[in-house]
Image (cartoon, rainbow, N blue to C red):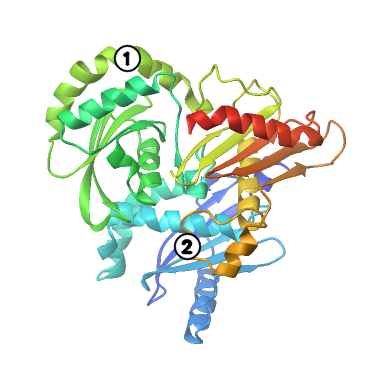
Amino acid sequence: MGEEGARGVVHLLCLAASSGVPLFCRSSRGGVPTRQQLPFSVIGSLNGVHMFGQNLEVQLSSARTEDTTVVWKNFHDSITLIVVSSEESNLELRLERLLQMVFGAMVLLVGLEELTNIRNVERLKKELRASYHLIDSFLGDSELIGDLTQCVDCVVSPEGSLLQETLSGFAEATSTAFVSLVASGRVVAATEGWWRLGMPEAVLLPWLVGSLPPQTARDYPVYLPHGSPTVPHRLLTLMLLPGLELCLLCGPRPPLSQLDAQVLERWWQPLMEPLRACLALGPRALPTGLPLHADILGLLLLHLELRRCLFTVEPSGDKEPAPQHRRRLLRSFYTLVTSTHFPPEPGAPEEKVEDAIQQAQLPRACYLVSGPEEPGAGWRLVALHSGPRRLLLLVSPQSPTHGLWSLATHTLHALTPLL
């Protein structure tokens, strides 16, 4: 099957829960946004069956047909989100987290009050247009993975300590606790205050910055879905280099004009070379000198307690498959092992004692061969869970399956100091 067929079609519907009035519909085909819309009769049927279940005190959360998965989710008894996906191997976990991120994006840019107390549907429709670009990026073929892992995508800079020291000094000088350096949606360095941001804003804010058109400076009003869903904050951004931005989350002060005059000259001009070196990493996200086995085609490292992750499909050379295909393989594998094999991630609902005993018996490693399991055929995928860290690797077909455990263990040991 071709690339587009593997990705399939995704339709995202947003409706007012009480009236069933559609607020917007976004779609993608093969990971590319499209104008294709579901017929109004289908939208009405999907919402109608969900409302019918609610009237009978039955919570309809998901359904499957031979080639399609549907997931419903209601937020604050005010907004209903529905996703219809024909993507291959699309487990409900992926679609549930997509809906959580979409609602988070709506709150981020519109505010919770507008979504839970709908006074004028037509006005709300217009206000929600501001979130379309961010929402479409979740439906597309992004180089980031925080929407699925609910961990912040990060970059490891070779001059990380120097950048961190400068960032902390700048934050103190401007009396701003929430400051970060963001490279194409990935956090390079951040203050302690920024790292203490809750979910989903910790993922949404750098993702938003990475999805916006390039601009020298911005003063952007945002709500924090977890920390401040009804009172807006100011998101200030200053471009240090194309693709590398300094981000501040603050109140009325400092004014953007004051920062624009001070920042580059005093704090960041002396660091242009380290900043360029950091930006040169690009989607690789890892220092170029880091020793990785030549068979590794992609990796995802998560620190589940810190809620940070490193994700790359470009650790070595121009080998097959293409980067887009590698990302899809790792995303599907992450969804599989998180849904069925590994213990629940931090933040999951509380468990009973007997559930905790059962979880202790779950595997700490697993592997999958995508394609024919023959020598020299089929991509190898291996996952390892150790303490707060979880590592997923995409490995070339030439790598023997009996060596995957050793390869994953050595790779995790090499990456542990980074995250």
For label 2, the SS is: strand
Which residue is more in the foreground, 261 or 11?
261
Q: Which mark is residue 13?
A: 2
Count the labels in the image.
2
Q: Which mark is residue 272?
A: 1
Q: Residue furthest right?
A: 374
Residue type pointed to by label 2: Leu
Q: Quadrant of residue 373?
A: top right
Badge 1: residue crowd in 10 Å (few <14, some 14–19, many ≥20) = few
In the picture shown, does residue 408 fall above or below 38?
Answer: above
Where residue 126 appears, x then y in whole percent?
A: 30, 57
**Label 2 – label 1 distance at C-alpha:** 44 Å
Q: Are marks 2 and 1 in contact (CB under 8 Å)?
A: no
Which residue is more in the foreground, 85 or 246?
246
Quadrant where the image shows the N terminus = top right
Image position of 174 (left or right of 80): left
